Image: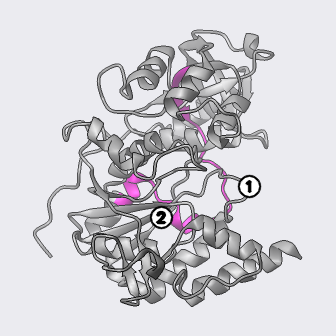
Amino acid sequence: MSQIKSLIQPHGGKLINCYLSENERKETLLRASNLPRLILSIRNIADLECIANGVYSPLEGFVNEQEYNSIVKDMRLSNGLAWSIPVTLQISEFVAEQYKLDSEIALAHPNGEILAVMTVTSKFKPDQNFEAEQVYRTADEAHPGVAAMKREGEVYLGGAIKLIKSIPYQDFLDYRLTPEATRVEFAKREWNTIVAFQTRNPIHRAHEYITKIALELVDGLFINPLVGQTKSDDIPANVRMQCYQILMEKYYPQNRVCLGVFPAAMRYAGPREAIMHAIARQNYGCTHFIVGRDHAGVGDYYGTYDAQYIFNEFTDSELQITPLKFEHAFYCTRTQSMATGKTSPSTKEERIHLSGTKVRQMLRNGQTPPPEFSRPEVAEILVSSMKLATV
């Protein structure tokens, strides 16, 4: 291993931490119990956590109107720092009156627990169709990201947050690593360079192939699956985690790979979400980020490699993390191995293209994904979970 250097700096140069001290928590909770209360949605809770623990550094709260407009129009914060998707706290017009400008409000979990306080410094009603066209490249409400954005509410509140209580999760507790924790772990493992892999699907053979190519270039691989809110037809996170664990155990070198969950909600914003995902992984301490075919895509809303092309719109000084851009990988029947068009001489007929969508379709049809698609241990987990889901 080469001499250990300091890890890559967080985006903006500082890792944000919005957690209050023990004494501050007690005092703030007492005050918050008398404040107007806002019950957070599932997406709000994911965003609150990502802001508070530094995943979304340099954000210190939900974006105000000035930052919102700058992000939507230019993919940058008002200070010029790259940021591609506005992280918003939205409410319906029906309840907007109770949340006043320049006042504190309490942010609560659906179970009633107060999680944080927020100082409302901005309250505005933007053009959501314009936001949809810019961020999602469509205003079609059949797009899950557009639909989710519009469900959240028409009025936007912006302001800094202070976290009183950690989000009360019951799952993946050993894998809920904050950016501070991953940076400690990477330094402990003496990794100078780390590649992050974002996924919301089980890792199939094409994923395994590109992650291992990437691992040839760096010291360590950070498998960082998104476990926040996804579409109803996506494979559940608990099933996917079983798949990641068995793959790591049997098919990756233990000293070269680390697994930690990404608590964010999925927005399906394609190219813009690829930028947001890359920035988040830089905050975790990663130097490289895998961008494959149709990253964070859905349906036919984005071109196959649009999520790679968008990185060309930013300079190296704007995005320190290095994107690793991969072509669509497939199983080549001629060479009987994984390949891409760069490495395989095969014809179209000799290529078995893999995707999370195809795996899901096979499972719904009662089919076991073949070895060319999935490792047998992974296929077994997926088939078993599908049988339980239909009982």
Nearest the camera: 260 or 165?
260
Does residue 20 appear anywhere in the picture? yes
Q: Do the numbered discs 2 and 1 sit on residues whose CB atoms are within 8 Å?
A: no
* Magenta stretch bounds: 158-182
Residue at (30% x, 44% y) in the render:
10
Q: Distance between the residues labelled 2 and 1?
A: 22 Å
Q: Position of residue 148 (x, y in %)?
A: 68, 37
Give the number of marks: 2
Q: Which of marks 2 and 1 is nearer the N terminus?
A: 1
Left or right of residue 42, residue 101 in this image: left
Location of residue 370 (image quadrant): bottom right
* Image vertical order of residue 308 relative to residue 346, above or below: above
Give the labeled residue for mark 2. Answer: 260
Residue 31 in view in this figure: no
Numbered disc 2: secondary structure: loop
Q: Which residue is drawn at 58% across and 67% down?
A: 356
Task: Kindly identify which residue carries mark 1.
Answer: 232
